[in-house]
Image (cartoon, rainbow, N blue to C red):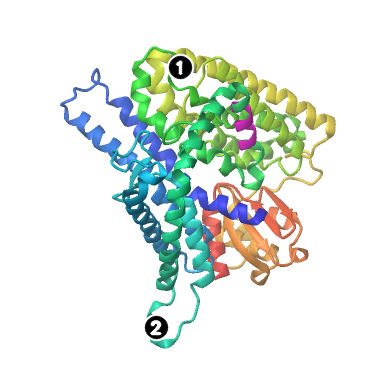
Amino acid sequence: MLSSFNRFGGAMLGAVLLFPFAGMVVGISLVLQNSTLFGPDSLFFHLLQIIESGGWTVFNNMGLLFAVGLPIKLATKAPASACLVSLITYLTFNAFLGAMCEVWGSQWGVDFAQDTGGTSGLAMIGGIKTLDTSVIGAILCGSLVTWIHNRFYSTKLPDYVSIFQGAAFVNIIGFSVMLPLALLTLMLWPKVQLGMVSLQGFIIEAGNLGIWCYIFLEKILLPTGLHHFVYSPFQYADVAVPGGTTLYWLTHLQEFSQSSEPLKNLFPAGGFAMQGNGAVFGGLGMALAIYSTAKTENKAKVAGLLIPATVTSMFIGITEPLDFTFLFIAPALFAVHAVLSATMTVVMYSLGVVGNFGAGILEWATQNWIPLFNNHAMVMVTQLVVGLIFSGIYFLIFRTLILKFNFKTLGREDSPIKLYSKQDYKNKGGKPADEFLIRAHAYLEAAGGKDNVASYTHCFTRLRLVVKDSSKVQPSEAFKEYSAIEVYRKGNDVQVIVGNNVTHIYEQFADLMS
């Protein structure tokens, strides 16, 4: 079960990784579209509008992205075919659903004559007017099609109908499944939409407690991959605000920047888009604590590992390289991290800090600080002051706990830290000398070889493996010898934390497996 959730979470990231850049493009374009800087009839102003429209492409087609993105990682064979069939099947689902809404919508509380968007519950998906199931419908369709693909893609049909084998056969089954699924969606989804509205009201009314629980769960569930199920509905679906917090913030950014009304009044759901504070301020405090408690002779090497991991956490918002340096060595510290992150966010929110702070400083600058500076500078000052205070709290608590309980964080273990270098790989001998290929080959061997790997995928920083026989997996040191940060093993699940080069290593690993 855990392995399935891990694979699903990794598959979700394929689409999610496209959002930060698109958000920065929209944010910068909106900031520069200021009539005091450039006239509304100037060439540069129109160019900015064109660039902005390109940035919105990702957010306006999130359903299509998830429908295509899931099979990339979840399909166990011919993933390209799975993506193609998933796309057409998702569009078929929406075509069925739209036609049913037009014929029977009134019986289930759907006014199909309304325009799409707003509170109508309708949307345009791939040029099809249909019921707005947001990313949830796309994830459901993509998951179903991928399961059908994995189960039936290799089915051998009689020679006289063999033309319908492979992707065509998967498409036929998917087409048949989408018809009853569309009917079921028409019957149930309008009630779900009403439920979401009620849930949104409940969460907002829960105030600080609701925000604390949201941030805590998003962080504490990171090792399991279940954190995707916590933040995704808030950021990309209609749980907190129509369209999700990310889309809502970007849509109203120009309006917020020109208003002197407190941001908390303008965007009360902003407390559910602030998990990045833990990455920035918490990451800084944790890194300093780990460095300060390392042995003197290891400090230089520890800094070499912590600096890029901390910079990645603070500026981009990818926390896994830092989190996993201590997560499996001292899980109690990770729990403390989750508590402090949630508490810091609630304190900020109570003092009026809201915004789209889901990632790191680069996103903050383009989507918050720069466009909002004129009318909301004190919000930024408050965020920085509270954040730096919590960085100090992180440092003191982590340092105290590491020393008191003698947690073997980086640089405190008895054996010296082995850092990765190209020369290390060259000294191993053998060809080819491509460092990613050598690392992938080393991890494959350490996992018991090709025949022992049942499935494999990756997320931001981890190579995730499911092995057939866990006894054949070599000790963690065999992975760390080739620059793995840490190795997490539970049953037949093996997670090799390798850092930001994981996609390159994964590609080489996949080639070796095939």
Cβ atoms at labels 2 and 1 below 8 Å apart: no
Residue 463 visible to the viewer: no
Q: Amino acid at mark 2?
A: Val
Q: Main secondary structure of the magenta part?
A: helix
Query: In which quarter of the view is residue 252 placed?
Result: top left
Q: Which residue is mark 2?
A: 161
Q: Position of residue 276 (x, y in %)?
A: 55, 31
**Lateral position of residue 343 relative to residue 111, left or right:** right
Judged by depth in the image, the label closer to the viewer, 2 or 1, is: 2
Q: Going 48% across and 16% down the picture, which residue do you hit?
A: 379
Mark 2 to mark 1: distance in Å? 63 Å
Q: Which residues are magenta?
A: 211-218
Between 484 and 97, the residue placed more toward the observer is 97
Vertical position of residue 321 compared to residue 503: above or below: above
Judge by depth and name the residue closer to the eye, 143 or 189. Answer: 189
The residue at 43%/73% (across/down) is 169
* Farthest residue, direction left: 41
For residue 465, the mark is none
> Where is mark 1, residue-wise?
265
Residue 336, quarter of the rendered image: top right
- Residue 237 percent location from the top left of the image: 46, 39
Quadrant where the C terminus lies? Answer: bottom right
Question: Looking at the image, can residue 280 be seen?
Answer: yes
Seen as rendered, the residue at the extreme front is: 107
Whether 179 is drawn above or below 77: the answer is above
